[in-house]
Amino acid sequence: MSDVNINIQAVKEYLLSLQEDICQQLAAEDGGKDFIVDEWEREGEEGVMGLTGGGRTRVMEGGTVIEKGGVNFSHVHGKSLPPSATAHRPDLAGRSFQALGVSLVIHPHNPYVPTSHANVRLFVAEKEGEAPVWWFGGGFDLTPYYPVDEDIVHWHKESKDACEPFGEEIYPKYKEWCDEYFYLKHRSETRGVGGLFYDDLNESTFGWDFDKCFEFMQSVGNHYITAYRPIVAARKEMSYGERQRDFQLYRRGRYAEFNLAFDRGTIFGLQTGGRTESILMSMPPLATWKYDYQPEPGTEEAKIYDYLTPQDWLKTLI
């Protein structure tokens, strides 16, 4: 692949602006706190992959609405790709790489406000004497505890709107991949109600050049906040008690299980000797596990289990 049109600086500038916009909007919705800024830089090569680079971590804890949230930017370089990155692409083993992206997770106080996650990223694998290999990845997904149909429809309409300018087949493809990816095999349930997930997006996927793939990344990144903020605004004032809070913490356990056992970003970060505080920022501040818990049939708590299988939400809920 030619490197003529690989504009890493443009991607970096966009990612930093995306991080800033999301933090500003979520802080405004919270109304009580702002995201702290933690700029970091590796002084020398670190970890088994010889990582260099840095990033900007933005974190809010103990807000009015947001119990814990992180919106992280990083741009790192490494001497060789880790196994998690070459498992599906063995031809890339031994290449040096650079990776840059924004990754975020928001855990609200109120059990009626869903947890959300988003990520957009670019990888470039390089080898002396050969053209660099690049690909984009990312997406966003929603994890409600007490699902509201109109929220799920809104989320998926925004997901579809992000994809629509790029072809009618894009949303169904990446919606299905999201359902498959955010699936807890040991629990036989999805993490939530999905959204979008894509990876390995480059010239060979749809015939798009670097600029077109970058445009798609921007569309996904920009649609996250338009998908999530209205849901937060609609649910953040709903009253709840100890029962709802206990169930939220129980379901957060599933979130932790997925992140530690299956999430590619977490595994990649840990395998490369990445910055642990930033990698584990996605973990909920509190979570519980109960032995063989089953909610009473017909209760609010039982409702979510009807939503933890892949469904065409824009057909079933409209």
Image: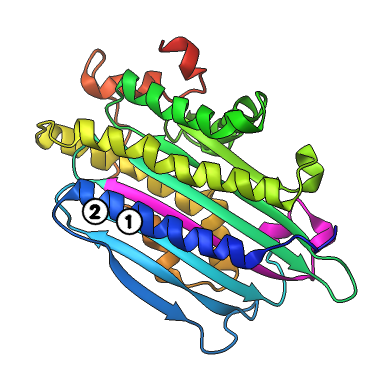
Relative horizontal placement of residue 136, taking residue 273 as reference (left or right): right
Residue 175: x and y in percent read: 57, 30
The quarter of the picture where the N terminus appears is: bottom right
Eyeballing the image, is 34 above or below 186?
Answer: below
Residue closest to the eye, 175 or 212: 212
Q: Which mark is residue 174?
A: none
Q: Tell me if residue 252 comes above or below residue 47 in the rendering.
A: above
Residue found 42% across the figure and 45% down from its top:
117
Disc sitting over residue 23 in the figure: 1
**1 lies above or below 306:** below
Q: Amino acid at mark 1?
A: Cys
The residue nearer to you, when weighing 183 against 62, is 62
Q: Single out the residue that lies furthest toward the bottom.
A: 44
Q: Classify mark 1: helix, strand or loop.
A: helix
Q: Which residue is mark 2?
A: 27
Q: Are marks 2 and 1 in contact (CB under 8 Å)?
A: yes
Amino acid beneath label 2: Ala
Q: How many marks?
A: 2
**In the figure, is residue 143 to the left or right of 198?**
left
Give the SS element for disc 2. Answer: helix
- Magenta residues (range): 83-107
Residue 253 seen in the figure: yes
Q: Is residue 275 left or right of residue 180?
A: left
Q: Residue at x 29, y 21 (%)?
A: 302
